[in-house]
Image (cartoon, rainbow, N blue to C red):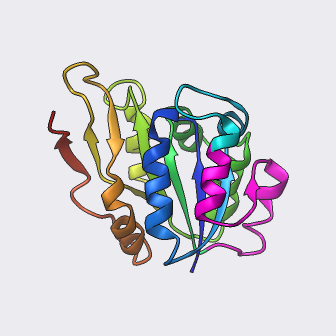
Amino acid sequence: MRLGICITGSFCSMDDMLYVLNELKDNYDIDIFMSEHVDTMDNRFYSAQDLKEKINHIVHCPIHTTINEAEIYGPNHLLDAVLVYPCSANTLSKLSLGINDNAVTMLVKSCLRNAIPIIIGIYSNDVLSLSGTHLLTLYNRKNYYIVPIFQDNYKQKPNSVIACKEKVKETIEKAFHHEQIQPILLGYKKM
């Protein structure tokens, strides 16, 4: 099975993303797609170059960063599923509204034509407020599947949720059978 993994700009979640890559690398042929921000921005967690080196150390494949590179995957039926992990609120909103302006959103749009599973692992400080409508929209759309989420710091960031990295593999497996893993609401992280 061939899996497209899309990495978007929730910078604080990159260690979780690397964990997920390690968990999936032996079970899938992986193609990596990256938003422009992750591709080019240094942040307080990683420089863009260091992050790409860590990704390439885990999965030895090119990192696709352009619309042109991503678009061909749908018409050529090159993937069996797409995982957007981490999925930022910005990307979540674009997917919900059909906005296609980068490699990640193009890949999802291009692959939806083949009715393959699109798995979303959300990381955002505002899912329980402004971005919540976009999560619920995708939850109710055909071929979208949500990695279970929990509040990561309900005392200081009560609207923030993150995907449970330990549930990604099971979410993908169920999505291949057109099933949404349950429950998707896991409560809160013990502090």
Which residue sits furthest right? 68
Kindly identify the residue that appears in the image at 56 percent across and 81 percent down.
1
- Residue 142 visible from this viewpoint: no
User: How far from the left and from the top, in percent, is residue 122?
Assistant: 42, 43
Kindly identify the residue that appears in the image at 49 percent across and 53 percent down.
18
Whether 65 is among the magenta residues is yes
User: How far from the left and from the top, in percent, is residue 113?
Assistant: 66, 65
Task: Give 167 or 116, whichever is nearer the viewer.
Answer: 167
Q: Please tell me whether residue 90 is drawn above or below residue 120 in the rendered image.
A: above
User: How far from the left and from the top, in percent, is residue 20?
Assistant: 45, 58
User: How far from the left and from the top, in percent, is residue 106?
Assistant: 71, 51
Q: Is residue 134 left or right of residue 47?
A: left
Q: Please tell me whether residue 138 is drawn above or below residue 112 in the rendered image.
A: above
> Residue 39's quadrant in the figure?
top right
Kindly identify the residue that appears in the image at 76 percent across and 48 percent down.
65
Q: Please tell me whether residue 153 is drawn above or below residue 30 in the rendered image.
A: above
| Magenta-highlighted residues | 51-79
Q: Is residue 127 left or right of residue 14?
A: left
> Residue 58's quadrant in the figure?
bottom right
Whether 174 is among the magenta residues is no
Kindly identify the residue that appears in the image at 67 percent across and 54 percent down.
33
- Looking at the rendering, in which quadrant would you find the C terminus? top left
Task: Give 140 or 70, whichever is nearer the viewer.
Answer: 70
- Residue 119 visible from this viewpoint: yes
Q: Please tell me whether residue 119 is drawn above or below residue 135 in the rendered image.
A: below
